[in-house]
Image (cartoon, rainbow, N blue to C red):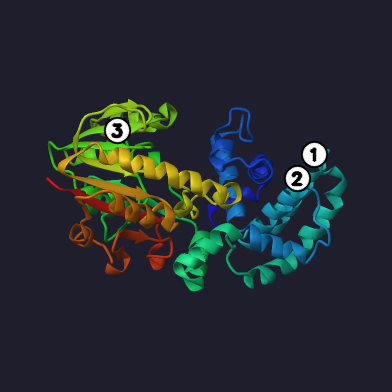
């Protein structure tokens, strides 16, 4: 068991557990994104010490990642589910006991004390005690028989139609495993050696275990930045060269901008959210890289022509569930149609900034073809003089030929399963006639 998990089972973990239950209520009852609940000034983490904040977020994330198996365990011991606050406390405790391997006495005592301290759950304090004592004895065996948490039907059905049942189950397994820490570095081989990381075939550095990013060697000198291995590929596909003018649309939080600037391009990074661009400003200062940062709506911004444009379009983010387990509980099927319409608008807009003979990289961190392949098929149909450069995509270092389709790269969380997976992405490279 990780040290962080052992701490959560100690008496000092009481504040973190209480906050974690608050985060679960915010996501599952109020429909908030976990990140929004974490950042809220008056939210469940307000006033907590940094260690407790990190622990609460981890506990909530792991519970959301394994909610289905937790409910299956509880079903064996509770005939009628209690009210939400108590139910989420029980779910959290089951995940700690059956998945995280926390000490039973610490988890049970903490849960009972938390139940007793809240008027909304005080009357079920005895139930919490009795159920969790039985879970501590028999729950792990029941847990071991459970499959990975299923995606909601609206998303599961779409994935089954696109990839089949076997692949969908593999994606769910990848989601349950979570995500390691990936870094993009100026010198990936050197960083991997320094940190004892895994140098991935596509050039990212992957670290296992829980690591404090700001404490890693090279952080203060700007030697690297955090970026999933899949998210690092669009900028590599664009392959900017020194002196080229490049527009990075929807740039926040800025990992792609840093890659393009590190390649020597003259980069304009545009995003509608000033708040989300703060991290890019911080990373530009830390790395000593330069980019022109613009706060504007891409649909109304007036800009010039560029040698290359990278559009990381707003999307359902269904490819990032392994690191954002709250998304299946917050996103809805109705979101997809509006997003697809916005993506079409932004594609047409982005293409208007590409010089003759220039190139456009389009990507979304989505698993849904309507946000990826279907968008490019429609763009090619309505735009003469445009084509997908499959040769350049295939020649990218580390690319598995199985990832390449006629319209671009299709990445899935179950790829590189033995290495820890990757985010789901669609990425393509379009070239325009001179």
Q: Residue at x 37, y 52 (%)?
A: 375
How many C-alpha atoms fall within 10 Å of the one at disc 3: few (<14), some, or many (≥20)?
A: many
From this viewpoint, is residue 153 visible?
Answer: yes
Vertical side of 331 occupied by 298: above or below: above
How many C-alpha atoms fall within 10 Å of the one at disc 2: few (<14), some, or many (≥20)?
A: some
Relative placement, left or right, of 282 versus 32 is left
Tag on residue 118?
Answer: 1
> Which marked residue is nearer to the observer: mark 2 or mark 1?
2
Going from N to C along the chain, the mark reached first, 2 or 1, is: 2
What is the secondary structure assignment of the residue under circle 3?
strand
Q: How far apart in space, not on screen, are marks 2 and 3 (Cα)?
A: 43 Å
The residue under label 2 is: 85
Going from N to C along the chain, the mark reached first, 1 or 3, is: 1
Q: Residue at x 49, y 57 (%)?
A: 178
Relative placement, left or right, of 272 versus 151 is left
The residue under label 3 is: 269
What is the secondary structure assignment of the residue under circle 2?
helix
Contact (Cβ within 8 Å) of mark 2 with mark 1: yes
Quarter of the image with the C terminus is top left
Going from N to C along the chain, the mark reached first, 2 or 3, is: 2
Q: How far apart in space, not on screen, are marks 1 and 3 (Cα)?
A: 48 Å
Contact (Cβ within 8 Å) of mark 2 with mark 3: no
Q: Position of residue 314 (x, y in %)?
A: 42, 42
Choose between 207 and 76: the one closer to the eye: 76
> Which marked residue is nearer to the observer: mark 2 or mark 3?
3
Vertical side of 156 occupied by 272: above or below: above
Choose between 8 and 224: the one closer to the eye: 224
How many C-alpha atoms fall within 10 Å of the one at disc 1: few (<14), some, or many (≥20)?
A: some
Q: Quadrant of residue 356?
A: top left
Q: Residue at x 32, y 51 (%)?
A: 195
Relative placement, left or right, of 131 versus 23 is right
Q: Quadrant of residue 136?
A: bottom right
């Amino acid at each position: 068991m990780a040290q962080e998990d052992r701490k959560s089972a100690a008496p000092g973990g009481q504040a973190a557990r209480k906050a974690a239950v608050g985060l679960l209520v915010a996501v599952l009852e109020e429909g908030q994104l976990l990140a929004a609940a974490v950042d809220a000034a008056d939210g469940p983490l307000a006033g907590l010490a940094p260690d407790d904040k990190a622990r609460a977020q981890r506990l909530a994330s792991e519970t959301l990642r394994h909610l289905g198996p937790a409910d299956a365990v509880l079903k064996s011991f509770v005939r009628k589910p209690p009210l939400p606050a108590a139910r989420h406390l029980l779910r959290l405790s089951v995940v700690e006991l059956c998945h995280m391997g926390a000490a039973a006495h610490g988890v049970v005592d903490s849960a009972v004390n938390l139940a007793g301290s809240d008027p909304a759950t005080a009357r079920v304090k005895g139930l919490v005690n009795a159920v969790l004592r039985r879970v501590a004895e028999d729950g792990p065996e029941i847990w071991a028989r459970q499959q990975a948490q299923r995606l909601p039907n609206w998303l599961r059905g779409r994935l089954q139609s696109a990839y089949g049942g076997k692949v969908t189950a593999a994606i769910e397994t990848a989601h349950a495993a979570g995500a390691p820490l990936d870094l993009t570095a100026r010198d990936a081989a050197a960083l991997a050696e320094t940190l004892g990381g895994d140098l991935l075939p596509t050039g990212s550095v992957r670290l296992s275990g829980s690591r404090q990013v700001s404490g890693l060697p090279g952080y203060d000198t700007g030697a690297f930045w955090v970026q999933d291995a899949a998210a690092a590929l669009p900028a590599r596909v664009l392959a900017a060269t020194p002196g080229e003018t490049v527009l990075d649309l929807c740039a926040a939080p800025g990992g792609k901008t840093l890659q393009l600037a590190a390649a020597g391009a003259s980069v304009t990074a545009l995003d509608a959210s000033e708040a989300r661009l703060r991290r890019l400003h911080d990373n530009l200062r830390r790395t000593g890289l330069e980019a022109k940062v613009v706060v504007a709506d891409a649909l109304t911004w007036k800009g010039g022509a560029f040698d290359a444009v990278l559009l990381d379009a707003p999307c359902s983010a269904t490819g990032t569930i392994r690191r954002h387990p709250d998304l299946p509980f917050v996103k809805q099927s109705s979101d997809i149609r509006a997003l697809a319409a916005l993506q079409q608008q932004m594609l047409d807009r982005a293409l208007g900034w590409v010089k003759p003979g220039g190139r456009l990289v389009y990507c979304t961190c989505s698993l849904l073809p309507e946000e990826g392949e279907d968008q490019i098929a429609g763009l090619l149909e309505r735009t003469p003089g445009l084509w997908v450069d499959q040769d350049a995509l295939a020649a990218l270092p580390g690319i598995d030929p199985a990832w390449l389709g006629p319209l671009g790269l299709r990445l899935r969380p179950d790829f590189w399963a033995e290495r820890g997976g990757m985010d789901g992405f669609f990425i393509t490279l379009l070239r325009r006639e001179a």
